[in-house]
Amino acid sequence: MKSGNWVLMVEATSELAIEGEVYSTRDGERYVLEGGAPPHKLSSTGFVYVRVEGAPNTPDYSMRYYAGVLGMKWLRSTGIAAKARQVCIADINEMTEDLLLDLLRESVDIEELRELVICKLLGDG
């Protein structure tokens, strides 16, 4: 799911979260993703808007949770950084030093760069 220059990712799979899909909490509760709001400041994690699976699609059944409750995380998606994340997820061997240097030149969000470097070094994609 995208919101402005942010994307909502499922942390366990590094896949893009999809509106209308069902996701589970660690406790096994199942919710339909209806939307979300990315972080508005550095100390924020952002929110997701959901409803219990099977509940009517009305405002009375909509809820707001921190993204982490559903194992999700908002990430800033900017040009080269978004490309690097996709390369990292698809094939760690394609992440080149030149691509990492481009990230540094582009002044991407430091937290995002940290995650990409960790992904490269540990092969966590």
Image: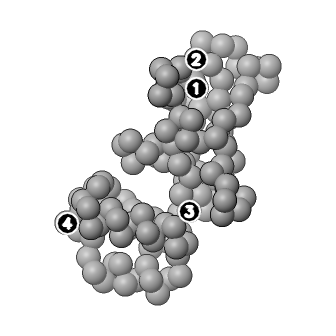
69 vs 93: above or below: above
Helix, strand or loop status at disc 1: strand
Structural distance between the alpha carbons of marks 2 and 3 = 28 Å
Quadrant assignment, res 50: top right
The residue tagged 2 is 53
The residue tagged 4 is 93
Along the polypeptide, which appears first: circle 4 or circle 3?
3
Q: Please tell me which residue is depicted at 45% across the width and 71% down the height of the picture.
A: 113
Does 38 sit left or right of 82 as displayed? right
Marks 1 and 2 in Cβ contact (< 8 Å): yes
Structural distance between the alpha carbons of marks 1 and 2 = 6 Å
39 vs 66: above or below: below
The residue tagged 1 is 32
The residue tagged 3 is 76
53 vs 100: above or below: above
Does 52 sit left or right of 63 as displayed? left
| Image colouring | one colour
Q: Please tell me which residue is depicted at 60% across the width and 12% down the height of the picture.
A: 54
Structural distance between the alpha carbons of marks 1 and 3 = 23 Å
Along the polypeptide, which appears first: circle 2 or circle 3?
2
Q: Taking the image as drawn, is residue 46 in sight?
A: yes
Q: Residues within 10 Å of mark 1 (few under 14, many from 20)?
A: many
- Amino acid at dot 2: Glu
Q: Taking the image as drawn, is residue 87 in sight?
A: no
Along the polypeptide, which appears first: circle 1 or circle 2?
1
